[in-house]
Image (cartoon, coloured by chain):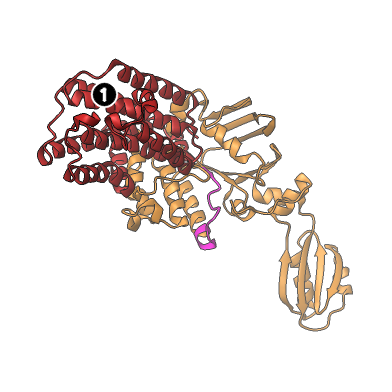
Chain colours: A orange, B red
Amino acid sequence: MPIIEVTNLHKVYGSTVAVDDVSFTVEEGEIFGILGPNGAGKTTTVECIEGLRRPDGGSVSVLGLDPARDRAEVRGVLGAQLQESELPEKITVAEALDLYASFYPSPANPAELLADLGLTEKAGTRFEKLSGGQKQRLSIALALVGNPRVAVLDELTTGLDPQARRDTWQLIEQVRARGVTILLVTHFMDEAERLCDRLALIDGGRVAAIDSPAGLVARVATEQTLRFRPSSPLDEAILTALPDVTGVSRDGGHYVVTGTGNLPYTVITTLAAHDVVAAELRMDQASLEDAFVAMTGRSFEPQAAA
Amino acid sequence: MSTLTKITTVESKLFLRDTTSAVMTFALPIGLMVVFGSIGLGEDDPEAGITKAFLPVMALALSAALLGLSVLPTVLATYREKGILRRLSTTPVHPGNVLAAQLLVNLAALIAAAVIVVLLGAVAFDLGTPSNLAGFLVAFVLTATALFALGLLVAALAPTGKAATSIGMLLFFPSMFFAGVWTPGDLMPSWARPVRDVSPLGAGMEALQDAWNGAWPDGTNLLALVVVTVLAGGVAARVFRWE
């Protein structure tokens, strides 16, 4: 049975359609990503799953429960980390965790959770004195303190520095290793590519595609590009003769070879056979961003620092 | 420990850690008592229609007004602005528990301030104690509920914590004027007296002074307090949003 099942979800705010038609299922134990530009309807979708909003059409089920009708039951098994949600300035880390633990019938051990999240030293620190990364880790701890079966994490790493983002990613993988199913909302391509088992690309309130990150890329990845500087003069003909190669061009001292199939292997073995070493070798493959552009017909919006 | 008890315990700690609210609640009434008590303002002045009930009643009414019109709405509006109430909505606990805890904490602070004021008046400045204790308690409870209901209304209408503070202050200063804080007893201009009798802080102070002096609070004052509580509380309950 899928942990989360969203079918033809539709949600309107006044005359604005926030979510037009979204369907997907999340299986037990996976990290499922919802990826899309700002305003695509990602947050509204998860708010319907969290029971914070009532769908105008379609249905949502979490472990077979309806978040709008079975509020209490869903809240007992689902941990949420909200975008831009804070705590009282003067509450300490330990107090917040202890308080939230008291809301659930069989909570996690707050002290162990603090240790897992590297917050033990900050237990007595007030919320206002925490760094962005520490606040984010506390927010994850609060989402997990009820021992949920599903954790919904919305824009987890927005506003974090690169190191804090990598630490947070590692943390999410640890959480999944504990058996928690994770629904991750993000507008960061690299985050989705790194963490998610499967992804729903959402644009304009609709699902553009659902697949693994590699699967999404493979759908659009028809060409690869190799760029290198040959160690000795090179006859282009030996490359253009290769079946996988579709084009060869020169850019100063560099060669740019485009092609399909197992391009890197073919090109490098051929060069080696002619005693040429490919220096400053770089390979470009289609990314998730290319996949998004190809599937929605428009570019991903510049990432706003929300 | 029940959820409400747990939340109330945490909210009490947060209340005490916030210097502004602690100073407003305790230091201000004590300071007023000491300063005005020392210069003899606490004595009867029959010609001006001022009794010795005025000073302690004013001190504790100021505490009630600051807690109800400023501290309570600012905290609640800030909690909503920062998504704290919304965050609670994703747990099995309803955010209404935080609202209830805030009311309890502010009420406890007000009771503590009232006890300090009464003791200080009796011991240090010979102001006596409320002669009609039952009447005093009724007036005290109704004053607190009227001001707290107004506070909830401010919290319901204010989009941010800062806005709640501003609206609270806009209500606070006219309330003080019409309560006769600067023009006690017969010093109040006659045109303002009808407003004093029905404005929440004015009616509250009149009722508390009457009871302090041994009489039963005037029906008009008590009715005014009940009407304010019902109206402000009713509108607040309708328009209050958790997010």
What's the amino acid at mark 1? Ala
Instruction: Please give left or right for residue A291 compared with residue B195 in the image.
Output: right
For residue A243, above or below residue B14 = below
| Residue found at x 42% / y 49% | A138
In this rendering, does residue A3 appear at all?
Answer: no
Q: Position of residue B22 (x, y in %)?
A: 28, 45
Which corner quadrant of the image does residue B121 belong to?
A: top left
Instruction: Please give left or right for residue B242 compared with residue A249 in the image.
Output: left
For residue A195, above or below residue A3 = below
Along the viewing direction, whichever of B48 and A48 lies nearer the viewer: B48
Q: Is residue A161 magenta?
A: yes
| Residue found at x 81% / y 68% | A257
Q: Which residues are magenta?
A: A153-165
Look at mark 1 in the image and give the residue it sits on: B207
What chain is tagged by disc 1?
B
Label 1 SS: helix
For residue A92, above or below residue A247 = above
In this rendering, does residue B60 appear at all?
Answer: yes
Q: Position of residue A111 (x, y in %)?
A: 31, 49
Along the viewing direction, whichever of A89 and A72 lies nearer the viewer: A89
